[in-house]
Image: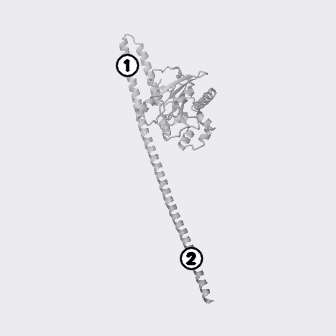
């Protein structure tokens, strides 16, 4: 369903009030697609254990749970993937909003315990806040993949986080009030799969309660939804017209769709412009941090070199002092021996 147009599935049953829409975000290779499959209970997203990742376009898949609740999962490309241009990412963001027409119930930021948390992942959060506003954090849940590896090492998620947890990750967890879950996407244990999914769903319901039972939406959501509804109404009016040939009806619909596409292009251009500004700002920030880190490392090396030089000089002075002491002792011993010999010779002559 990746890339479906906004009008194609407006009446799709999963967009009912009981449905829950999750947006998966994170670095390529962290296991977004595998996590989506675990949530849906079947393999619908292409997934591979690779740092290169697989997802090349935004895609939505749905399932209905035993209790009748519909779950929509939107799998995204990496929002800070260096191989993607701003315009490509901008179009994918519009697709995300298009697919989540009635709002997003939870942003699932997928991280892996198998890899280090990067500045790029911290930048993904900045990009989300830039486009959706700071309130998007109120809907965020951090999903850690690699539960099987922690189990093999007899570790819990708390053990993992209590280690050398980088400050940016600490800030993210603090911002989303510690909402986090651990997923094992490789397990064949159906009980574990159900348990970890239910834990996530319970957390989503808690997020919904904290936000007054409303999913996240913003002006872009509302504008796209309004445009789609107006297009649908106009199509119904055109379909009800009398005295027009099928070709004339088709031409009218084509004109309406062109007008709607212009609206989408305008919104996409706005998003792309905002993305370029955000990306430039983040790149400058990362460059400054990198330069500061290099400067600190160079200073540390210089201080270490200075310290090593001082130690070398101290050792040379110590060695010199030891040699001088040894030479002095030798000279003293020789002088004492010479004096003793002279004293002995003087005694013999007196006798």
Looking at the figure, which quarter contains the C terminus? bottom right
Judged from the image, the secondary structure of the residue bearing numbered disc 1 is helix
Determine contact: label 2, label 1, CB under 8 Å. Answer: no
For disc 2, the marked residue is 334
Question: Is residue 315 visible to the viewer in this orientation of the structure?
Answer: yes
Judged from the image, the secondary structure of the residue bearing numbered disc 2 is helix
Which quadrant would residue 194 be assigned to in this image?
top right
Q: Which mark is residue 254?
A: 1
Please name the residue shown 50% across and 63% down the image.
313
State the residue lying farthest toward the top: 243
State the residue lying farthest toward the bottom: 350
The disc, 2 or 1, on the residue closer to the chain's N-terminal end is 1
Question: Is residue 181 visible to the viewer in this orientation of the structure?
Answer: no
| Above/below status of 144 relative to 68 | below
Please name the residue shown 56% across and 70% down the image.
326
Residue 88, percent from left and from top? 42, 31
Spatial distance from mark 2 to mark 1, Cα to Cα?
Answer: 115 Å
In the image: residue 76, left or right of residue 246: right
Please name the residue shown 61% across and 89% down the image.
350
Residue 7, percent from left and from top? 45, 21
Q: Which mark is residue 146?
A: none
């Amino acid at each position: 369903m990746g890339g479906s147009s906004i009008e194609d599935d407006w009446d799709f049953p999963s967009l009912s009030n009981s449905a829950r829409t999750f947006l998966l975000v994170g670095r390529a290779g962290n296991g977004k697609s595998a996590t989506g499959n675990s949530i849906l209970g079947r393999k619908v997203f292409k997934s591979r254990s690779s740092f290169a990742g697989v997802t090349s376009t935004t895609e939505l898949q749905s399932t209905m749970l035993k209790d009748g609740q519909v779950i929509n999962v939107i799998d995204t490309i990496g929002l800070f993937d260096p191989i993607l241009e701003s315009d490509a990412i901008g179009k994918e963001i519009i697709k995300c909003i298009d697919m989540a027409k009635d709002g997003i119930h939870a942003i699932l930021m997928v991280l892996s315990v198998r890899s280090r948390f990067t500045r790029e992942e911290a930048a993904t959060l900045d990009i989300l806040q830039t486009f959706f506003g700071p309130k998007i954090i109120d809907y965020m849940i951090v999903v850690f993949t690699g539960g099987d590896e922690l189990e093999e090492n007899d570790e819990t998620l708390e053990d993992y986080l209590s280690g050398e947890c980088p400050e940016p990750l600490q800030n993210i967890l603090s911002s989303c009030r510690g909402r986090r879950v651990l997923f094992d996407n490789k397990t064949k244990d159906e009980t574990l799969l159900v348990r970890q999914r239910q834990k996530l769903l319970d957390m989503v319901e808690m997020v919904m309660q904290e936000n007054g039972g409303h999913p996240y939406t913003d002006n872009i959501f509302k504008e796209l939804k309004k445009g789609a509804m107006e297009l649908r109404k106009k199509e119904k009016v055109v379909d009800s017209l009398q005295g027009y040939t099928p070709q004339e009806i088709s031409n009218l619909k084509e004109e309406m769709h062109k007008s709607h596409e212009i609206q989408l292009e305008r919104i996409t251009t706005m998003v792309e412009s905002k993305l370029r500004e955000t990306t430039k700002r983040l790149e400058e920030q990362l460059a400054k941090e990198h330069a500061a880190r290099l400067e600190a490392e160079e200073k540390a090396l210089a201080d270490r070199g200075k310290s090593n030089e001082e130690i070398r000089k101290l050792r040379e002075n110590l060695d010199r002092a030891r040699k001088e002491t040894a030479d002095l002792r030798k000279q003293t011993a020789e002088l004492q021996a010479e004096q003793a010999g002279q004293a002995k010779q003087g005694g013999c002559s007196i006798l």
